[in-house]
Image (cartoon, rainbow, N blue to C red):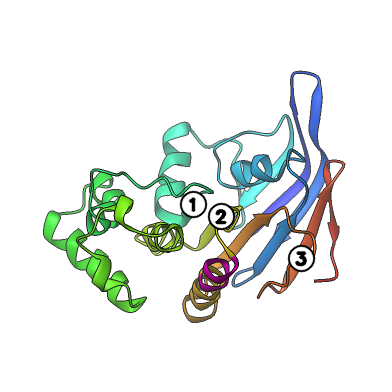
């Protein structure tokens, strides 16, 4: 599903990724661990087609992406990749339901259809009681779980989660991981998440440490 071969990325004279190789199969749940600033977010952005490596080849779904136009990359992201960010990125002036509908609205889905899809997701993940509340009235854990549900609106094949638990307490971190595990097991979505915690026990089947620009297998 994802293949990165000999990926190099630098900003000015600073090399962040140095000949990195990585593969992910359908249904994988993968953690990429490492200290702040080692390039975890850069790696996710390259996988998500938000950045281009200086050298190397990126393949998604068996096809090389380096010849895709910006519009083609944007369409691939919209249809197949869900993003979860560290700080939720919910729009404060929209209700929970409207926030979840937003990606569908941007894709031109009819109002009735996108509302039905958003309510279906909220019900599926047992969070329909929050539908008409605004983000500022939610806890941090609730906001992050809503952000995850929003990432599911297009039934993505891949979810990229950039340090999704970094601003949460232990209880909410556990709830969030349970939700991601549910999405992975029940819907078969490939999930790649980053974390600065090198030893946290996660419901993942593959674990890596990003160090000195390359990935190394981790024990947990």
Assess whether mark 1 and mark 2 are in contact (beta carbons under 8 angstroms): yes
Residue linked to disc 3:
207
CA gap, disc 3 and disc 1:
19 Å
Magenta part of the chain: 170-175
Q: Secondary structure at mark 2?
A: strand
- Category of crowding for the residue at label 1, using alpha-carbon neighbours closer than 10 angstroms: few (below 14), some (14–19), many (at least 20): many
Instruction: Judge left or right: residue 147 versus residue 118.
Output: right
Mark seen at residue 160: 2
User: Magenta span has 108?
Assistant: no
* Residue occupying the point 74% across, 38% down: 37
Q: Nearer the viewer, residue 215 or 168?
A: 168
Q: Nearer the viewer, residue 127 or 102?
A: 127
Compared to residue 205, the image places residue 100 above or below, namely above
CA gap, disc 2 and disc 1:
5 Å
* Quarter that holds the C terminus: bottom right
The quadrant in which residue 55 appears is top right
CA gap, disc 3 and disc 2:
15 Å
**Nearer the N terminus, badge 2 or badge 1?**
1
Q: Secondary structure at mark 1?
A: strand
**Nearer the N terminus, badge 3 or badge 1?**
1
Instruction: Judge left or right: residue 69 versus residue 13.
Output: left
- Category of crowding for the residue at label 2, using alpha-carbon neighbours closer than 10 angstroms: few (below 14), some (14–19), many (at least 20): many
Looking at the picture, how far across and down is residue 50, in whole percent?
Answer: 54, 37
Looking at the picture, how far across and down is residue 147, in whole percent?
Answer: 41, 56
């Amino acid at each position: 599903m994802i293949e990165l071969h000999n990926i190099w990325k630098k900003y000015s004279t600073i090399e962040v990724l140095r000949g990195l190789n990585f593969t992910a199969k359908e249904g994988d749940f993968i953690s990429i661990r490492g200290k702040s600033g080692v390039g975890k977010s850069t790696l996710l952005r390259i996988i998500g087609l938000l950045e281009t490596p200086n050298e190397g080849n990126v393949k998604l779904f068996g096809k090389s992406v380096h010849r895709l136009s910006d519009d083609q990359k944007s369409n691939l992201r919209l249809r197949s990749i869900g993003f979860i960010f560290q700080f939720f990125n919910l729009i404060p002036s929209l209700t929970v339901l409207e926030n979840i509908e937003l990606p569908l609205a941007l894709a031109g889905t009819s109002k009735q259809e996108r509302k039905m899809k958003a309510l279906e997701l909220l019900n599926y993940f047992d969070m329909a009681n929050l539908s008409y509340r605004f983000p500022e009235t939610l806890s941090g854990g609730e906001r992050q779980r809503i952000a995850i549900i929003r990432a599911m609106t297009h039934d993505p094949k891949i979810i990229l989660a950039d340090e999704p638990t970094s601003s949460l307490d232990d209880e909410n971190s556990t709830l969030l991981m349970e939700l991601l595990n549910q999405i992975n097991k029940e819907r078969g979505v490939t999930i790649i998440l980053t974390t600065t915690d090198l030893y946290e026990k996660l419901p993942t089947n593959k674990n890596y440490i990003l160090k000195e620009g390359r990935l190394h297998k981790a024990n947990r």
